[in-house]
Amino acid sequence: MRYIGRKLGFYLVAAWIAITLNFFLPRLIPGDPVAIIINKQQQSGTVPPGEADQLRKLLGLGSGSLLGQYGQYLDSLAHLRFGLSITVFPTPVADLVRQALFWTLILVGVATVLSFGLGVALGAITGWKRGSRLDAVVPATTLLTAVPYFWLALLLVYVFASKWQIFPEQGGYDPSLDVGWNGAFIGSAIQHSLLPAITLILASIGGWLLGMRNMMVATLAEDYVVAAEAKGLRPMRVMARYAARNAVLPSVSGFAVSIGFVVTGQIVMEQVFNYPGIGNLLFSAVQNEDYPLMQGIFLAISFAVLGANLLVDLLYGVLDPRTKEA
């Protein structure tokens, strides 16, 4: 319990720091989102008195002194009010982030988990059978990892979407369909997500495979693995229970960071495929100087990274009980 309490205390402080930075950083960026909207309104007609103050309240920017605005910001967060988007005014930021997160978590989340699982499994096997023909898999996968991501994405689009027309080129679904939980829409969404998912897996599996393979080779020389083999235990049990369980620990830490940053989406991938995820939304928010939307996205990213790291820290304590003694 002390281990869990220490971890929770640390991440609560980290969450407060992230919230505070999320408040101050956009206010240090040159420009005023309210002035942008006022200028647009002035081009089409007169602006009524007090419009700027009303817009600040609607956008969730607060008013008064900086300390007062910080207090209003914390109160808004406590009530899950994130203001309105400038890009899609007057749509609430929470609605836009929620919609984009759904698409990103389904695509990038599943692709990240699959690439991690496949990479670790293949790495464990190639490390266990080091020096065999399976080692030829390592340079092939690491070559894909070294290729610039947008090149790989564009190459797959050209071959499988433009040339062979196996997959759709862009979008998250067929726009002619009604959005909802129906067979036609779900089938279209799956079809549109296959090529981006394959791109993500090919681009990241090599790193997991190489890291796990090298850790397996190092772990196989440890005394407890040699002792398990000397006892005559079955090879699969030695590989899974003794070698792979300890070799996977560094990969678990890396997976925590990767799964946390799933929420950021993949900006390049979502731009290439025009996929309606959080990365595409963030790109649009930056282009339009949409500070409320940027704040909402950055806050979601911060809490996703902190939450993922907390869960993996607790899992790390189960996999390696020695960490609880530190």
Image: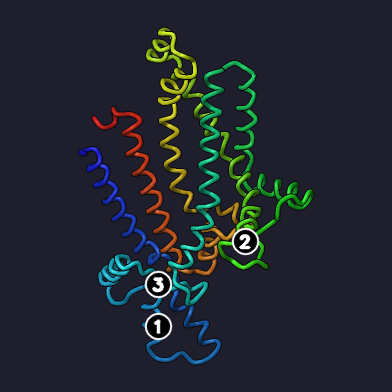
Between the C-alphas of marks 1 and 3, the distance is: 15 Å
22 w.r.t. 87: above or below:
above
What residue is shown at x 61% (from left), y 16% (from top)? 132
Question: x%, y% of residue 186?
Answer: 60, 57
Front tag of 1 and 2: 2
**SS at mark 3?**
loop
180 w.r.t. 316: above or below:
below
**Relative horizontal placement of residue 14, taking residue 140 as reference (left or right):** left
Between 22 and 220, the one lying in front of the other is 220
**SS at mark 1?**
helix
Name the amino acid, label 1: Ala
Residue topped by disc 1 = 52
- Number of on-image labels: 3
Between the C-alphas of marks 1 and 2, the distance is: 42 Å
**The quadrant where residue 20 appears:** bottom left
Q: Residue at the left extreme?
A: 2
Question: x%, y% of residue 26?
Answer: 40, 64
**Relative horizontal placement of residue 191, taking residue 280 as reference (left or right):** right
Indicate how the structure is coloured in the image: rainbow
Between the C-alphas of marks 2 and 3, the distance is: 31 Å
What residue is shown at x 42% (from left), y 41% (from top)? 256
**SS at mark 2?**
helix
Disc sitting over residue 185 in the figure: 2
User: Dot 1 surroundings within 10 Å: few (below 14), some, or many (20 or more)?
Assistant: some
Front tag of 1 and 3: 3
